[in-house]
Image (tube, grey):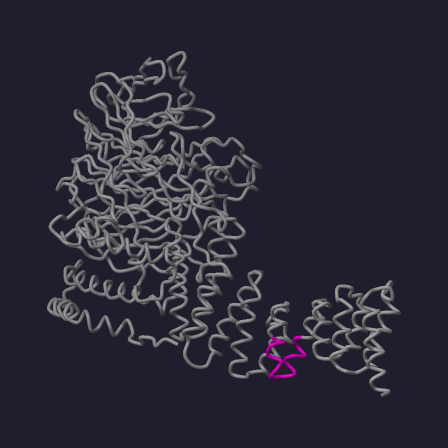
Amino acid sequence: MKERNTTSTLRRILVNCAAQAKEYGGCVAAKVPEIERDMCLKEFLSLKTCMQNTCKHNLSSLNLRGEEFRSGMSAKASSSQLSVSSSGSGGLSHVYIQHPPLRCNVPGSRGLFYDDGNKLLLSPTSDQVLSWKAVPFDPHVAPTSDSISEGPVLSIRYSLDAKIIAIQRSSLEIQFFHRETGQNFCHKCKPESDSILGFFWTDCPQCDFVLVKTSGLDLLACDADSKSLHVVETKKLNVSWYVYTHESRLVLLASGMQCKTFNGFQLSSAGIVRLPKFEMVMAKSEANSKPVLEDEDVYIATIYGRIYCLQIDRVAMLLHSYRFYRDAVVQQGSLPIYSNKVAVSVVDNVLLIHQVGAKVIILYDIFADSRSPISAPLPLLLRGFPRSNTSSSRSNAKDIEIPEANTSDSETIIYGDDWTFLVPDLICDVSNKFLWKIHLDLEASLPCSIVSEAPSVLDFLQRRKLESSKAKQLCLAITRNVILERRPVSTIAKAIDVLLMSYSLSLKTGSYLKGTKTDKTSHSAGTQISILQSGASAPTGEVDAHGTSTKHQSSATVDNESMNRSGNFSTSDSEDNAQFNSLKAISIVNKEKLSGGAESSSSEVHPSSLQSQNLGPSNSPLNASVSERQESQLISPAISVDEMYSLVFAPVEEEMVGDPYYLVSIIVEFLRSASSEKIKVQPNIYVLTIQLLARNERYAELSLFIINKILEPSKEVAMQLLELGRQNSQIRKLGLDMLRQLSLHHDYVLLLVQDGYYLEALRYARKHKVVTVRPSLFLEAAVSSHDSQLLAAVLRFFSDFTPGFKNTTDCRAYCQILNEMNSAVAV
């Protein structure tokens, strides 16, 4: 037995963070009754950082088993020592970027552009364009190049089949280059009509290319052989700027004096669907002042497979969220922001709100029934940057791969003025030509009240996909800890429900058995959304897939502005709506944080594969193709019932102090939850329960557990009961009855013989036709009893009921023994 440290987390926080708490409280007291936004922000962040560090120390003290996890923690600790925070010193954070970045500094570069349709970072020069694959992220990936002609570059994209390069040369002209033949042709707009805002490629059956102009949309079919574009359809609208997400195939067109009125179109392999016109919410700064919504204030992000439009209201200091349906656009609620400059990222379905002015990040999980952040706001860290003057960098450099060359001080800049955040999880440093990938530190993102909020924390961890192995180990550690701390059984029961519901769902979806797959590397990788062309009877749909936004302004003329309009192709898992609805079953509370609008009853918009043409029934959602889902599917963090035994109950049983009946209560709740989820429990759990009850001689409760089938019958359970039956005859009888109930006739006969009930065993063997028991077993037992009458009865039984027994050597040998026994008695 091991002694446990009973010091509470709250006590450690009060002791370790007393100075910061006093400083923050004094600052607030000095400013009351005047209440201002960001009041005492510096002191508040200092206190929060201290509390988070204390919480991390508490979490690291958990009994985290497994060599793989311990190795991972060691590597993480090493990288933490080499990390550089926004203040220039190492520290704790729940979000970090890993050195080195993807370096895209090319001589003669005319800017960086992000092609979200092909997940490419593009850098055009005077005579060529270089492209780097951004997904999967590899800082050492080599660029590919294609030749182009001299001229300005306002925007550039590859076609989805990667055969054609389209370059916007001016507000009136788009130039096309065929990569294989080298031929090129141009498409021009009439100067008197309107100007081009941007363009994108599509796999819509009606068109290949969409031109966004101030007068609306031109849907064009591309004919590379004839070197021309043909207008298929024109959507006449007034457009100030637009937002397009390739993965959702959704384009939002802003119009009006304040640019807050939007028209939406989805152009997918299922066809073209026009979404309802809607307006975004904007607060007024003054009585006669109407703020104008900018394209940089609108993000499209995908969280848990559903697309959200996130809008920054700088006057109200709120982040509004919207969800798209076929017949409505519903506002989902608002979250507070605390900085004039805000950016949005999504990592592993966690919403990251960068408070750029305050240089901190706030995390939200919209799946939870709370608008509160997941944890305290903390700065963004740079990990892995070499610091040659510190001993830690020398001693731990082997844990982190850091290139020795091509490093510069510009790579240590955090929240630079030219940083552009590409949804979901990339950052482009336009001035220094760097591309960073954002990572989430699961351990640091957990709340301080990790034990008291165990069910919700486990629920959060079970939804994580990118670091599923780490999430799984954290879940195991938290579960062990709450049991060892003897938390209320009701709390642990909720935690177990979360784990088993998640495991049941993973079995149904097959994700528990799948291994980690790499992302696609083809130019056309991605998952699109499709709105079904069904009638009113079809279920209505919400725009559902992961989002990548590309934003364009009508006044865009320079490279930096072009880069600011770029969006990123998501690297997180794409989950269809059916999976999302199933996932809601494992949440303790079935509401989303960003609630505020009623769900539409009409049919939802579902994702489909970019290359799949199998549309399926018209009244069913289109999901990602099998190959793509397999490639994006990671190992599930779900915990099996066997792992619950070997990694939770068995270790806890060894460490637990006092009456083991508490652990029995936990196991009973586990069995209840497993039964409700129809999950088969292995006999080792039942055997452990029997051992715990017998340890304190709770034979009456054990009998009730067996009679009421709380412990399911099995051979292992029966044998354990028979072993305990040496001290309690009633328990032994239950074990024998269980063997008979399970039709384990051979074992039952052997036990009757072992107990000396030879004739009863023979009668049972004859009745149930047990032919697997050797006659010699009965004959040897009869001889050892020194009872000649018993031996004679056994011989008579086998002679009468076993064909050919009289001709065996056993019959002759034991008949001779019987004669000798009778002769000895006569003498």
Q: Position of residue 168 (x, y in %)?
A: 27, 23
Corner quadrant of residue 544: top left
Would you say residue 398 is visible in this rendering? yes
Q: Is residue 718 above or below residue 176?
A: below
Residue drawn at x 40%, y 19% is 222
Corner quadrant of residue 732: bottom right
Corner quadrant of residue 546: top left
Foreground residue among 201 and 669: 669
Foreground residue among 809 and 295: 809
- Kindly give the residue lying farthest to the front in the view shown: 827
Query: In which quadrant will I find the C terminus?
Result: bottom right
Would you say residue 194 is visible in this rendering? no
- Kindly give the residue lying farthest to the right in the view shown: 800
Q: Main secondary structure of the magenta part?
A: helix
- Which region is colored magenta? 721-735
Q: Position of residue 74 (x, y in %)?
A: 28, 56
Q: Is residue 251 left or right of residue 625?
A: left
Foreground residue among 436 and 309: 436
Q: Is residue 315 left or right of residue 322?
A: left
Q: Position of residue 399 (x, y in %)?
A: 26, 50
Q: Is residue 412 left or right of residue 304?
A: left
Foreground residue among 423 and 235: 423
Residue drawn at x 25%, y 44% is 401
Query: In which quadrant will I find the N terminus?
Result: bottom left
Q: Position of residue 4 (x, y in %)?
A: 34, 75
**In the image, residue 729 lies in the stretch drawn in magenta:** yes
- Kindly give the residue lying farthest to the top in the view shown: 226
